[in-house]
Amino acid sequence: MKRFLLTLAVLACFGAYAVSFDISTGDLTITSAGSWDVTGTTTAHSIIINTADAVNITLDNVSITGVSCAFDIQSGTVYLSLTGNNTLTSTAAAGLHVASDASLAITGDGSLTATSQGEEGAGIGSNKRENSGEVIITSGTITANGATYAAGIGGGGHGCANVMIEGGVVKATSGWLGAGIGGGTGWEGGAGYVTINGGFVKAEGNNGAGIGCGDEGGRIDPGTVVINGGTVEAHAGSGAGIGAGSGSGESGRGPEIIIAGGSVKASSDSGFPIGPGAGQGECPAPVNEQDGEVVYLATVGAAFNDSGTEYTFTTTKDDSPYTYAYTGAGHTANGDMNLYFYLPSGEYTASGTNGRNFAGTINDAPGTLTRYIPGEVAIDISEGDVTIETEVGAKQDGTIIGLYGNYIISGSSLGRSVTVDSSEAPTVTLSGASITDVNCAFDIQSGSVSLVLENNNTLTSTGAAGLHVANGASVTISGTGSLTATSQGEEGAGIGGNKRENSGAVVIESGTVTANGAGFAAGIGGGGHATGNVTINGGVVTANCGAYAAGIGGGTGWEGGTGSVTINGGFVKARGGNGAGIGCGDEGGHNAPGTVTITGGTIEAHGGSGAGIGAGNASGESGKGPQIYISGGSVKATSDSGSPIGQGAGQGTCPPVLNALAGENVYVAPLAGATAPAVNSIYNVGDGEVTFTATRTSDQTTYGYTGEGHSDTYDLYFYLPEGTYTIAGNNGKTYAGSVSSSGSTIMETPEPAIFGILALVALCLRRR
């Protein structure tokens, strides 16, 4: 076949313009400077560069296969630009050969696959027993496959690399015993010089390192690997991910490794991720570039929230000028949202342009930088719907507005809403927010939300719970403000579940909370035909059911059992309709009546035809009321036609009320006038709270109460096991008497006048 020789004379004819050449017509041999645009497909011809001058070549959808050396840079400097998809496959040399005195710079937006199929040639780099010339990759999509004993990019068998990657997408796979990027096998197969400053780099070694020495390499010169940036994934079988090959240590050592930037994900099947391979020997610990300190893996967990978007992370060591940076799209192509930094020991913060912030300590061992809450993220609900999502943060009308902060929501809105679907346990502050006239004003679909109340807040839903807490989710309410949450339809609880949905966990720590359920739903707890999961530890809580439900507990229907209601403190006022004040909804409790546990607080529970605390009106016909435990607090329970505590007006049974500590039956023991004005209130001492302790004479069992008493009486209502008691309050009042199943004889013990006078004197002295 006719062969073409292009020489300097040809270049002179074309001047500075590129020469077009179809490789299917013959060999392209270049012996002088110039520019060539190469196209075509061939299984017989090749490109040969043999000049001391600079040559510009564009490969435009070129395929050269089945020849000894598809692209042979014997000398000179070649600037290679890629357009379209290009393939170079050599049968007896490097796929793209760069002789030891030559250099190659690859750019362009196209792709290149370079493969060596024999004679220990690198995919891109040198031939057998030859060190590679300089290979620089700036852009493009590059895939390089080395032959047996050779690197994917770098040295052929028994050769070293000279590689710099500035950008692009680079995948390099060695042949048997070579490194992915670096050296070929053998004593001479050191890493040479490998520098990665950017791009996405994936290197796979086979008994050689992913990046570094080939198998048994590094004896003569192990070389250097420098990583300043980019996204690097390096893996090996028995070689190190980055470092020595499998047998390097037996006859030499691994390269010096410097990591000063980038995300470096290194792994090995049986060698070290970074360092020695599986064979004996040593490899220097990786160090940074600034002062030679040893660096350790610092995993930045969940740094990315999406795939394919490029972000920048800057990591700063506290009280030090040391910085470590990364720009890229991460390892998300494999579904990995982490980043992998290498940092000296110290305390760090890392900040990303995607709004994610991290902090952590590296202490002479691998560690983790974990996400921390930055500042407050202010949101005006009137400007659009708000969603808070896992791995994304807060969006308003689809635009990210803040991540992993304390979201402070204010403003008034008709038709807007807040939705939380996040495993990040966000903190949301309602600060004078009013969200009304919308299907669900505040929808916690998943996750654990800390809800802080500032000022006065209103949530009103037309077709769901006012504050919806899905089964499996949770909300903890605290703060000094107030919240009124109302459901106006579709059997939603004021706070809790929707229709036929058991409530997630509702915990109230403080604040003033008013919850109004829709028809058939609880004020706080289950929607219609569902149960609650409620804990109250403090605050002022008012819960009003819709018709047929409990104030706190379950909605109507067989499925409307109590669930779990626990009250440990606070002032709680619950009103039921045909359901209990606290407990089951009407006809509820058939499947599982649930549990009510009271250990403290001031409780006022009223039912219509349901019990004050216990069963709904008809619960007994198809099931029974909840188990009730009372071991503390003042419990004022009333009902229009049901039992104060126990069953509703309908037929059926409810378990006896027990003391949770001893399992004994307990009975109401009123303390008449326990919080009546006395010396305490006359001189305005304290904050209005009183503390009472009841002690059983026989075994010193105690029952306690701390609070300000009830809203409409000075009496307190204890529930005590049978026995004789003495009761003392910190306001000077004392009581004594007995409690039994037939009633209570607890009466106030008159205080001797002298003791009253002494108490008055003591209080006066205290105020002075």
Image (cartoon, rainbow, N blue to C red):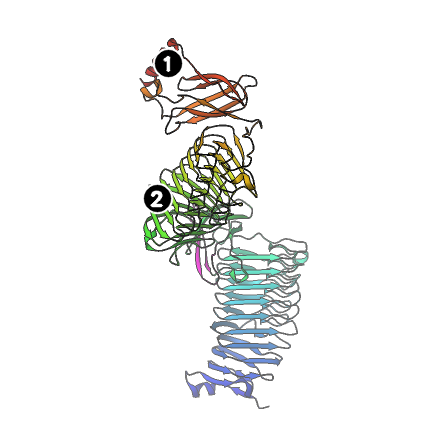
Q: Is residue 721 above or below residue 501?
A: above
Position of residue 756 measured from the top left corner of the image (x, y, whole percent): 37, 12
**Dividing the picture into quarters, in which one does residue 158 lie?**
bottom right
Q: Secondary structure at mark 1?
A: helix
Q: Residues within 10 Å of mark 2 (few under 14, many from 20)?
A: many
Quadrant including the C terminus: top left
**Dividing the picture into quarters, in which one does residue 385 lie?**
bottom left
Determine whether label 2 and label 1 are within 8 Å by CB: no
As rendered, which of 627 and 378 lies closer to the eye? 627
Position of residue 612 measured from the top left corner of the image (x, y, whole percent): 46, 34
The magenta segment is 303-328
Q: Residues within 10 Å of mark 1 (few under 14, many from 20)?
A: some
Q: Is residue 381 magenta?
A: no
Pointer 2 residue: 457
Of the numbered discs 2 and 1, the one sitting upstream in the chain is 2
Image-based side of 427 in relation to 558, left or right: left
Position of residue 619 measured from the top left corner of the image (x, y, whole percent): 52, 40
Q: Residue furthest bottom?
A: 2
- Whether residue 98 is visible here, answered yes or no, is no
Residue 759's disc is 1
Q: Is residue 80 above or below residue 741?
A: below
Say what amino acid the circle numbered 1 marks: Ala
Label 2 and label 1: CA atoms lie apart by: 44 Å
